[in-house]
Image: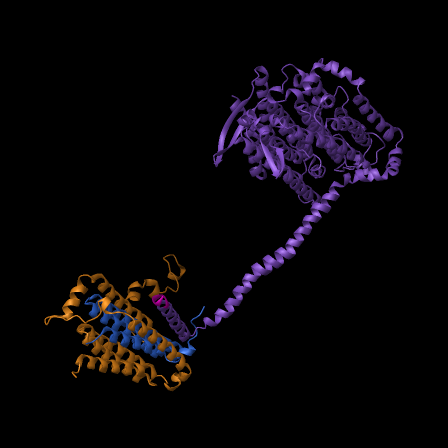
Chain colours: A purple, B blue, C orange
Amino acid sequence: MLTWLSIIIILAPLAGAISVGLLGRVMGRPPAHWITITSVAISFAASVWILGIYIAQPFEVFEKTLYIWGQSAGIPIEVGVYIDSLTIAMMCVVTFVSLMVHIYTIGYMCDDPGYQRFFAYIAFFTFSMLMLVMSNNFMQLFFGWEAVGVTSYLLIGFWFKRPTAIYANLKAFIVNRVGDFGFLLGIAAVFLVFGSLNYGEVFGHAELLSNETLTLWSGTTVSMATAACILLFIGAMGKSAQVPLHVWLPDSMEGPTPISALIHAATMVTAGVFMVARMSPLFEQSTAALTFILVIGGTTALFMGLVGIVQNDIKRVIAYSTLSQLGYMMIAVGASAYAAGVFHLMTHAFFKALLFLGAGSVIIAMHHEQDMRKMGGLWRYMPITYITMLIGSLALSGIPPFAGFYSKDSIIEAVKLSTIPGAGYAYFAAVAGVLVTAIYTFRLFFMVFHTKPRMDDKTKSHLKESPWVVTVPLILLAIPSLVIGYILIGPMLFAEHAFLNPSLYVLPQNDVLAKLGEHFHGALAFTLHAPMTLVFWLAVGGIALMWALYIKWPGIPEKIKNHFSIIYKILVEKYGFDIFNDWFFGKGTRGVGNVAWKVGDIKIIDGAMVNGSAHLVGRIAKLSRYVQSGFLNQYVQIMIIGLLGLMSWWLYAWVG
Amino acid sequence: MLSIVDYLIFSGLMFGIGTMGIAINRKNVIVLLMCIELILLAVNTNFVAFSRFLDQTTGEIFVFFILTVAAAEAAIGLAILVVLYRQRNTINVEELDELKG
Amino acid sequence: MEIDWLKFFFYCYAALALFGATMVIFSRNSVRAVLFLVLTFVASAGLWMLLQAEFLALILILVYVGAVMVLFLFVVMMLNMNLSPLKEGFVRYLPLGILIAATIVAQLVWVYKNTDMAALHLGELAQKPADYSNITELGLALYTDYLYPFEIAGVILLVAIIAAIALTFRGPQNRRSQNIAVQVATRKDDRLRVIKDVGPDSDLKA
């Protein structure tokens, strides 16, 4: 039963993608979206079914190899499924958000010429993501990892006539290559130690990792666990856009908004978090790797949030917010609170998709204007978007009882208790990040929906609420954003048989969630406890501050900007990551390329080798042309001289 | 008594004359053909001599076939010569420089 | 001193053959060159005769002198070349030619002189009984062991005949010969052309 359900889950979106991708032009628009939506809905239904089976009768893990694709040097390269609570959670989130985005796309892309292509891509993305999530071995994980990367690339550059989009998708692709290289090395390290790529076999002997060491250079050895985990995490850094490999995510907003919601907020970018959680038996072997994750996660959470404050593009604000929230998730997994990380991943998927789709709704109303300085006062025109965005913003800021509060607060509490080195820094970053989150979220919210309208009259006259295909997903996403935290915090994190516990492995001394669970007395108590924490007041304070700055005294932001122009400049330039990358990697590689081109290519390869060999042949030919004169007697003469030579050689051999 | 060395030297000299004829003759294709006949004659003499001194018929059989092939070669060579002369109205070797790619 | 007649005739024939060969390459007139070639072949046939290879010696005269040389002569006369310019530049290449020929001959002779022929069973000419027949011997070998090569030789000659004809044949020229194939293949339309079709319902009928 589970086998058939999982096959259906994986293949339904693939079938949709292939049929629409190949026949989209023939079938026209309505069949294109009906086919893909149906296929994803089937996936979603099957995922929920599996969830139902699991709830009715929990099982440890369901693993099955479906197909052996090939065999190389005795290593089977398989396609299989590995279903446990973590997989089920991810499957439900991915298919649900994907379904919402599919429906929403009907409204958002209604006048785009690449309508069918878009549906084919996102259905294919859903397939890839499910392959990634449901795989039972590292090879398939890597396949899914790359396949989502490819779809991400295709979708960022969906409007391939815009130079910025092409630049952005190239950037995303190249930056992800860096991460993927680390990831591949990590997989190689895992294979080196375990001799297998199967999850079951690898996780069963995870302690093997800590016994091995890797000699970097003579005298310096590093634990194999640390090396492998950090390498794997570098892959996660690329995919989940952690500092310093985060640079591609803000630029990826060049893609259509549904993509930003689906891929660059809810699902693909959380693949890194999922991967670390999935590999928890390995990551638990190395405290050093966890510290590394904590530091990277903390840095991303705080500093990327700060950049979000100064952005004016509505989607970019949310993009930086995504970076920051991914940082939170990384903090959680770094502190061994994998369940909290995955929980935040789920809640974030809902409210961030909601925010993106809401932003998309605003963008539709504004006729594809994304600059917040040209918006304002939209609440009057688009009430549904307004209310759902409010829910999303509150959830993001971590105000109880919205979903974000529960997940974020459990992360902060967990990291507070963690004893892993770097937890102190991560705790500080997470707490400070709450204030920052509230600030940028409500800056966006107030600038867009309140304050005086700043758009031109023509746009203003056309302002209206988006069609139902847009608002229905918003409402459907707003509901989980509102309630999912309250409902699921107990079962997910703290219950005696918490949902995710069977699939995660935590060393007893690292198990902060268990310690936290001792003080947990139900979701209601957790909620009521909130006003007694610093975090809550930071969030509320941030919202109040924004209310003061943008509604009460609207002149002040400008003054602050001018007063702290250096800080402002640093933030606008995003700490110079792009400049540095352009200068060092861009210009550097161009320089190296130039040298290689001018010296290596033109002089050595073209000059000496290609043209050189041609010249040589030419010169030899020039000489040998005299030989081929066409004169018969010359030929005969050469024959005779050859015969003479042959005879002389024989004679020499005979004498010798 | 006749010795094989006598025959071998004779045929060597004949062969040398044939090659010399090819080397010095720059004008007349017919003479070239005749020089080839001389060379073949030298080779045939060698065959016959060895055959007789070894008391085996093989060499003579071989000569028989060489004569056959040489006759065929002469016939075709002369036919080509005739055609060539019809086309170019000359058999001057130095004017025949078309034999190149 | 008793004269070794065999050796005497050998030197006579050898000298005659070499003289003829030299004259072949040096004579200005192609006709004379061909005639000297005939002399060379006849003398060589004599040399072969001394080796008791009677059949081949006669074949050489019959086939070569009788057929091939006549062919040469025929071609030379037919082409009717202007002979004198064909010998120009002769002296220029003479030293090179002599050098090449002398080197080849010197090498050969050096090898012959330094080879122990007796060790190779080449010391003496085998004495044949009085009723020995060279032709019978050759015929037996040719029609038994060498039957296939013999037939192939025949095919080669056939090919040579066809090739020579194909090369030189210029087709029937100005001949009013009957082309049977065309006559048989002809159809009514080739001979009869209807200018105007007058059907049964045509106006022209009346």
Q: Quadrant of the C terminus of chain A?
A: bottom left
**Res C168 visible:** no
Query: How far across and how far down the image is residue A542, in percent?
Result: 82, 27
Query: How far across and how far down the image is residue A604, in percent?
Result: 60, 58
Furthest residue toward left = C131
Query: How far across and how far down the image is residue A446, in percent?
Result: 82, 29
**Number of numbered tags placed on the structure image:** 0
Classify residue A455 as left or right of residue A274.
right
Q: Is residue B39 above or below residue C191?
A: below
In depth, the one of A8 and A645 nearer the eye is A645
Q: Tell me where residue A462 sits by quadrant.
A: top right
Q: Is residue C195 above or below residue A154?
A: below
Classify residue A141 as left or right of residue B73.
right
Q: Magenta stretch: residue C35 in it?
A: no
Q: Tell me where residue A238 sits by quadrant.
A: top right
Q: Is residue C4 above or below residue C156?
A: below
Which residue is depicted at the point 15% across and 64% down? Answer: C140
Which span is picked out in magenta?
A652-656
Q: Magenta stretch: dominant SS?
A: helix
Q: Tell me where residue B101 sits by quadrant.
A: bottom left
Query: How far across and how far down the image is residue A239, in percent?
Result: 65, 35
